[in-house]
Amino acid sequence: CIQLLIFAVSWIVLSLGYPAYSVFIVAILFNLIMFIVRLYLVSSLISIRVSHYLKLVLLPVVMIIILSAFLSFCVDFIIPDSIMFSILNIFNSFLITSICIYFIGLNKELRSKVKDKIAIKVLKFIKSNK
């Protein structure tokens, strides 16, 4: 039902002469509203405090997005424009985001599990190439 409302509001926004990307802005706003409504509905069903969820889940996600986007844009601003550097920047953005997720998004226990998994994969790779 709300998805149809996104379509209708987007149609109105475009009819008013706004640029095509405004459809994405409308969709993002409606999805944020739907997220908040779902969060409050589910919080009462499973007895989780909204503030607890925001602190443990949403805050790290927002921090990762902001930091990785900022660092990726800084690198993009520094390097010259070419297809090779664009490919390098994609890899760089992936690496920056992965590092941000590892240090901001994971707690100590999960970091240890990821480190152990990577160590196992590296050892298997080394043994298979001998």
Image (cartoon, grey):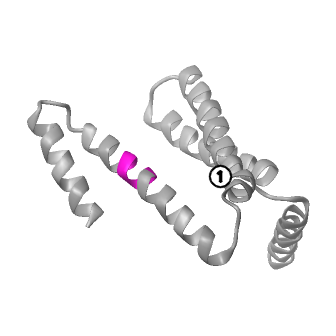
Q: Residue at x 78, y 48 (%)?
A: 104
- Nearest the viewer among 60 and 78 is 60
Secondary structure character of the magenta stretch overall? helix
Q: How far across and how far down the image is residue 32, in percent?
A: 45, 51
| Label 1 Cα neighbours within 10 Å, binned few <14 / some 14-19 / many ≥20 | some
Q: How far across and how far down the image is residue 10, in percent?
A: 20, 46
Image quarter hosting the C terminus: bottom right
Q: Residue at x 49, y 37 (%)?
A: 86
Lateral position of residue 62 relative to residue 129, left or right:
left
The image quadrant that residue 110 belongs to is bottom right
Based on the picture, tell me whether residue 31 belongs to the magenta stretch: yes
Q: How far across and how far down the image is residue 115, in percent?
A: 87, 64
Which residue is most to the left?
A: 15
Q: Read off the residue under disc 1.
A: 58
Question: Which span of residues is magenta-colored?
Answer: 28-32
Is 37 above or below relative to 74? below
